[in-house]
Structure formats: C-alpha cells, structure tokens
Image (tube, coloured by chain):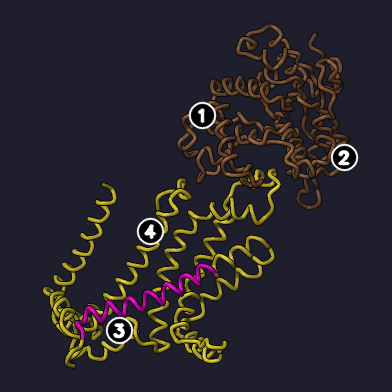
Amino acid sequence: MSANASAAPRPSTEPAVEIVGVGKVFPGRRGAGVTALEDVSLQIEAGEFVSLIGPSGCGKSTMLRLIADLDAPSSGTVNVFGKPARQARLDQDYGIAFQQAGLLPWRTVRENIELPLQLHGAGRAARRARADELIELVGLGDFGDKHPDQLSGGMQQRVAIARSLVESPRLLLMDEPFGALDEMTRERMQTELARLRAETGAAVVFVTHSIPEAVYLSDRVVVMSPRPGRIVRLLDMRLGSAQERTDALREDEHFFERVSAVREALHGDAVASVQGKEAR
Amino acid sequence: MKRLRGAMLGIAGIVLLGVLWEAYKALAPANGVAINGLTVLPRTSDAAMPHLSTMLQRALDPVSSVPGSAPLWAAVLQASAFTLSVAAVGWLVGVIVGLVIATIMQRFRTAESALLPWVVLSQTVPLIALAPLVKRWGTFVHLGAFDWQDWMSVALIASYLAFFPVSIGALRGFSSPERAHLDLMRAYGVGWWRTHLRLRVPASVPYLVPALRLAAANAVIGTVVAEVSIGLSGGVGRMIIDFAQTGSSDPAKQWAPIFGAVIVGLVAAGAVVLIGLALGKYRRNEVPA
C-alpha cells in the first residue's frame, strides 16, 4: 500500500503529474497565512485515475488548482507531462471540470462544448463535428441546441464533462464534478465517467468527499487530512480495469473492503501513527 | 397574450390621464385653490389648462397665420425628428465612451479608484452651466473643412448625461462573471482581451440593457435642455420656448411641442427595447424587472 504504481502496468511514458515537496500558504489578515498544503509529494502516471479525498480544508481542491495552474504553489514544484504546470496550461495539456458546471448561459449546449476549440482558433466545421461527437458520447443527442437553463443539473454536468474532453486531453482534472447531484444521478454519472475514461485513456485527478465514489472510480485513492493539508495515505484500489467498472462492482465484496480501508484511513488521521490502521 | 395585456394597460393609463385632466378642469374652480394666498391647486382656465380637444384641434391648424405655413403637427414632428437624431448621436457617443471607461476601470483596479469618483462627480455639474462652455470651446475647433456645429455641442452634452449609467452598468456587468467562469478562461490559457470579449462582454448584457434605457432617457432630456441653453433652433426644445411666448394668446399651441418631446422619449425608449430583444439570448437568466 504505498505510492508505487507497479501494481498496474502502464505504458512507459512520463508521469502525467509530478508534485514534489509542494506547500501552499494563502496570505491571511495581519500577516498570518493559512497553510492549505504542506510538503506534499505525489506522482500520477499517464492514464491513471487518482482520487483526492479528505474532509473540508484538507487542501484537495487547492492541490487540483495547483496542477491546473489556477494558483501557484508557495514552495515546491508541480510538473505536468514533464513541463511546469504553467506551460502545461498554456499548451492545453489538460481538461477541467468543476462542481458548478460553469456553462455560459447564453450559449447552447453545442456552443458551450465548442468554446475551448473556438478560443483556440479551430475552424467552424471542425468545431461542430467534434462537438457533435462529444454530445453523442455523453448521451445528450437531442439537446445540442438547448440552452443550459433548459437542462437538469445532471445534464449540465455532462455538458461540462463533454467540454473538458473536447480537446482530447491526456489529463482530466475534476473538482467534485458530481457534488451537486442527487445520489441516483450521481451513480449513473460515475458509471458514465468510468466508461468515458476507458474510451479516452486519459489520466484523471478527481477531487471528491464521497468514499464510494472514490473507490468505484479510482486506481488509487489519496487520503488527505486538514490543518495543514497533507497526504496521510495512498491506497491502491485494484478493482479491475476501467472496462470492468460496471454497476455490479458496487455490490462486490472487494468494493466494500476498499471502502472500509479508505474510511479507516480517513478517520485515523487524528491518530499520531496512521501506520497501524491498516484494514486487514 | 402578456404583451397584449401590457399594451392595453398602457393605453388605459393614457386614457385615465386624459380623463383626470378633463375631470379636474370641469370640477375645480377656475382660479384654482388658494390657502392663505398660496395657490395649492392650479388654475383651470382655458389659458392654463386647455381642453384636450382644443389642443388636438390646434395641432391640426397651421403653425401661424402666415400664408402657406405647415400644419402645427407636421412642424412639431419635424422638430421632434431633429431632436431625436441629435439625441441619438449623443446616446451613441455616450454609450461608446461609457463602455470604454468601464473597460478601462475593469482592466485596471487603480483606474477604477481614480476614475469612478470623477464619473460620479461629473453628473453633479449642472447642465445649464456646461452648455455655454461647450459652445465656446466648439468655436475653437477647426479641422480642415470640418467646423464645429452647434448641434454637435448639443449632442456632446447629451452624451455627457448618457455615458454615466452606461459606464456604471457596464462596470457591474463586466465584473459579474462567476469565479468558475474566470477559472475556466484561465485554464484555457486565454488572455485578458479574449476573456473580455467572450465572457465579460456577453455577461454584462443583462446589466447593460437597463443602462442603455437610462442613457436614452438622459440623452433626450440632455438634448432638449441643451437646445434651449445653447440656443439651437430646429428641435422641440427651442420650439417649447418659442411657443410659450405666445402662451397667452394661443394657449393650446405650446402643448404641441411638449407632446413632441414625449414622443421623442417614447421612440428612444422603444428603440432600446428593440435592442434588448435583439440581445435576448444574453438575457436568458435575467429576472424580469
């Protein structure tokens, strides 16, 4: 149960994300900063699905924002596909989706999905073809010309995911994308995300505070603790390849066993030594 | 259906106003109501409050007894069209200036701190004080074949009133996108200008449309008042003053340009409504006011 990813053989490419000794302090009032992350190191392989889980304030979203270069680390380095995070952002090496779908209300579903392509100068015909492909992929066939306010929350989130995939990124960053959905929609979206991920082969960094969600989707789960935010445990899931992640998995014995393991790692974070809290 | 109901209510409102006018004229004493020598309700004599029918009749008659003079309504319409066109120029200039100022204030925080107080302060300068100055400055402007015209001074003053609501409304609108949208644009590696065009400008439309409506009303008022204080003839502003001088002998006549000014205001407001409809897709999440 360590950080090494030897369990699942991967194509010999450079890691998708390499975080080394990263800290993040947000400046507070009267000079007293808030330490969101302290000395965090993590390597995520190409094609790997990694969930960041932990209570509020553990810095999991901050970590995602550092990878996306939406914030800069106070110390340490963040590399994405072997380059600095800023360069990776400018090179459009990742797709991103947030808890709020963040669709532009004046654009139709298709135009929203086209947005990144349009901003990066793709031609009209190519844009449309690609957007239609994605609309099919996320199962919104008849809704291409609808506006976001005509869609349910789950459908809006599908549009946001389609938008994050439209430029075929090798890395997908997702910050609690299903956090605002009801449980049933949520499980359906998880199944779809597992399928999409199998089809695209992209690495995924997935922030969540749902244990079953993390276990169901991930190759590895990173358990974090707050004040200051740090990694307390890396847990391999080994629940089969992405193609095998169907609804049946949710009833599987291994699934429950892994859920317990994550839960104990989470709740053990107050104990001085987390080493003795292994589930088995 | 809803729109029809709105139109009906609008018409009912106008009819009610007419009924009130005539009812007051019929019921109140001719010399008005005075308490301790202080007139609290206006006189109702024909000189002070002509019948609506008299006003209408007067509008159909020629402007003056000079042979061949046009009917009053035609003269008023012509003056209204002139005022409207000057106001439109003033509105357009004001909108452009307002948008530019708002863009600068959005782009540079320090510019917001530096400019915003002046923008607010600018509106406290009385229009009447400004008009002669603008006219005088205009006389110094000679660019080749271009000479400053008086109507340009009027349009400039109109734009001075029009830019204010636009700059304030646009600044609020440009600042309205959510954090998630701004993060998204940053994630796409898009610079400030394209974020402005693709995100801030479209997001500002719900704030901009009411500002444009205010700007239109301000431009019309500014034009009418500036016509008077600069002494530009041809518009309804000047016409109101001219006709008021014949008020005692021809009391119904002075009401015609007043209605002309009302028509200018209505047309201007209507034009902005059309602009708002054309921008409908940017106003989907707007709460009906």
Q: CA separation, marks 4 and 1?
A: 34 Å
Query: Three-letter amino acid code at disc 2?
Result: Gly
Residue at 84% of width from left, 44% of height from top? A74
Q: Foreground: B156 or A137?
A: A137
Q: Nearer the viewer, mark 3 or mark 1?
A: 1
Residue B196, image x and y in percent?
61, 55
Q: Residue furthest bottom?
A: B66
What is the display colour for chain A?
brown
Q: Nearer the viewer, mark 3 or mark 4?
A: 4
What element does badge 3 sit on?
A: helix
Q: Is residue B280 magenta?
A: no
What element does badge 4 sit on?
A: helix
Q: Residue B274: which numbered mark, if any?
A: 4
Residue B88 vertical placement versus A50 (above, below) = below
Q: Are marks 2 and 1 on the same chain?
A: yes
Q: Are marks 2 and 3 on the same chain?
A: no
Badges 4 and 2: C-beta atoms under 8 Å apart? no
Q: Name the subunit of mark 2.
A: A
Residue on which the image places disc 2: A76
Question: Where are the magenta residues, as a range?
Answer: B70-96
What element does badge 1 sit on?
A: loop
- Please tell me which of labels 3 and 4 falls first in the chain: 3
Q: Residue furthest top?
A: A253
What is the display colour for chain B?
yellow
Residue on which the image places disc 3: B240
Query: Three-letter amino acid code at disc 1?
Result: Leu
Task: Name the magenta segment's main secondary structure.
Answer: helix
- Please tell me which of labels 2 and 1 falls first in the chain: 2
Q: CA separation, marks 2 and 3?
A: 75 Å
Residue A134, image x and y in percent?
58, 31
